Amino acid sequence: MKRNRRRVIVITGASAGVGRATAQAFAREGARIALIARGRAGLNGARRDVEQLGGEALVLPLDVADAAAIEKAAQKIEKEFGPIDVWINNAMASVFSPIKEMTAEEFQRVTEVTYLGYVYGTLAALKRMLPRNRGLIIQVGSALAYRGIPLQSAYCAAKHAIHGFVDSLRCELLHDRSRVRVTLVDLPAMNTPQFAWVKSRLPRKAQPVPPIYQPDIAAEAIVYASHHSRREIYVGMPTVGAITVNKVVPGFLDHYLARFGYESQQYDGREDRHRPDNLWEPVDAEKDFGAHGNFDSRAVRQSPQLWTSLHRGWIAAAALVLGSALLVSFFARERD
């Protein structure tokens, strides 16, 4: 890629939440950004953000569960902006509900959006990146890809599926000696608008499991992944903790989540079972919800864990220099 050419970025689920924050972050680099989502008001808001921050935007209203629409969008992106450099799969849908109350149609819909939407986006990206032998696909994952929790079975299953899909793809790219890369960015609970519009059968309002992180932190990790070759990036100590504890004592987590997993996903106020939800139709068709949800007062704005992860090379080098200096000092004293 020529240094003077703006990178071409594709973001699904770009109208709100993590996708919206990611679009803002890439816009600060002056990127040309294709914005994919269903909600027109949110997409138009994202376009304004991108243009005000110095980037270029192309709005593509579509449902990622439609493979033909994704392929058509990819064609339009390359016609308008040029070769795609980074494709970010981020769009999601969920249902807060006990499994016994879920319907087959709800499981199918969440799977089509949250898992197959990633597959369709990946196929469209690979079709263009493989012949050029360059490009990056970033899959926005979750700690829930490693550890399922109660009341979000369809979403957790889809995130698990994404992880397995990426493992297979990565092996095939390595086998073919392809320079196309794939990276997973695993997130903790995020302060996004989805909790105001997700379909829910909970008695009280849905919330992300605390501690809650601002979506700008996720965007920082995603932008970093676009510049550095990393297999996977964990965001936040809760992500690291959930993955680690589940590997060591999964049975303990079963009982812990059975006891506390219901209450931790709800907060003050009864849920309105008749409010609009976005499972089948977008709720941001007329209203722009932005990047942040309703939990700004409780959301963490920085992650020391992520900073450490993104700067681990410098930290290791500093540790090596310090260790060498201590050894030199020690042997100097021994000689005296």
Image (tube, rainbow, N blue to C red):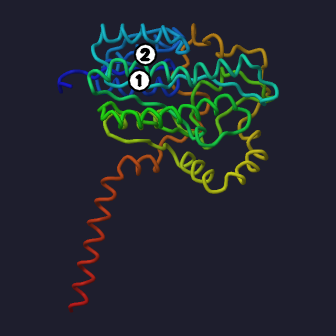
- What's the residue at 49%, 40% (across, down)? 301
> Which type of secondary structure does the marked residue at label 2 adopt?
strand
Residue density around tag 2, few if under 14, some if 14–19, many if 20 or more, within 10 Å: many
Crowd tier of the residue under label 1, counting other residues whose Cα lies within 10 Å: few below 14, some 14–19, many 20 or above? many
Q: Is residue 108 left or right of residue 23?
A: right
Q: Earlier in the sequence, mark 1 or mark 2?
A: 1
Q: Position of residue 71 (x, y in %)?
A: 43, 11
- Residue at 30% x, 7% y is 79
Is disc 1 in contact with disc 2, using a CB cutoff of under 8 Å? yes
Residue at the image position 68 percent from the left and 16 percent from the top: 277
Q: Which residue is mark 2?
A: 35
Q: Could you tell me residue 162's position as x and y percent?
A: 54, 31
Question: For the image shown, how many numbered marks are present on the structure?
Answer: 2
Vertical arrangement, residue 312 with respect to residue 281, above or below:
below
Give the number of the mark in front: 1 or 2. Answer: 2
Number of the label disc, if any, that sits on residue 23: 1
Q: Could you tell whether 128 is left or right of 42 in the image?
A: left
Is 180 left or right of 211, judged from the image as shown?
Answer: left
Q: Is residue 223 above or below residue 40?
A: below
Give, as a three-letter code, the residue at label 1: Ala
